[in-house]
Image (spheres, rainbow, N blue to C red):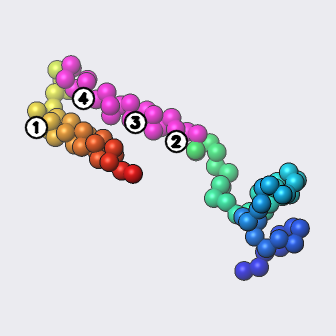
């Protein structure tokens, strides 16, 4: 697959930022392939969706213990609690 890049370069990902001008770097960035598809709204909204869902899941055990109608069986509560603790501890061991 042959590309027509400006300035006679063969690959815009191989740029020496110390010796090139700002104009050349801008041109290299414009012609280099990247994974950005322009869907900025979905990326920004995903931050708020993750924040809402993680907050709801975090506060659910507190609400389940304080609201009588939301009672869950003790063993399910303990399983979820210890499973979450295990995930946190396992995440700490990842290097």
Q: What's drawn in magenta, residue-wise? A: 44-67
Q: Earlier in the sequence, mark 4 or mark 1?
A: 4
Between marks 1 and 3, how big is the CA–CA gap? 23 Å
Between marks 1 and 2, how big is the CA–CA gap? 33 Å
Residue 61 — which label?
A: 4
Residue 8 location, quadrant? bottom right
Q: Secondary structure at mark 1?
A: helix
Q: Position of residue 34 (x, y in %)?
A: 67, 60
- Look at mark 2 in the image and give the residue it sits on: 46
- Look at mark 1 in the image and give the residue it sits on: 75
Furthest residue in direction bottom, as rendered: 1
The crowding category of the residue bearing disc 3, from other C-alpha atoms within 10 Å (few below 14, some 14 to 19, many at least 20), is few
Between marks 4 and 3, how big is the CA–CA gap? 14 Å
- Residue at the location (30% across, 41% down)? 88
Q: Position of residue 7 (x, y in %)?
A: 89, 68
Residue 53 — which label?
A: 3
Residue in the foreground of this view, choosing between 62 and 5: 5
């Amino acid at each position: 697959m042959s590309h027509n890049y400006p300035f006679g370069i063969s690959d815009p990902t191989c740029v020496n930022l110390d010796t090139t001008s700002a104009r050349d770097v801008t041109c290299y960035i414009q012609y280099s392939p990247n994974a950005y598809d322009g869907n900025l709204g979905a990326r920004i909204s995903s931050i708020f969706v993750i924040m809402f869902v993680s907050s709801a899941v975090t506060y659910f055990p507190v609400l389940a213990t304080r609201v009588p109608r939301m009672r869950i069986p003790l063993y399910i509560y303990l399983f979820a609690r210890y499973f979450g603790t295990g995930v946190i501890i396992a995440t700490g061991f990842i290097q």
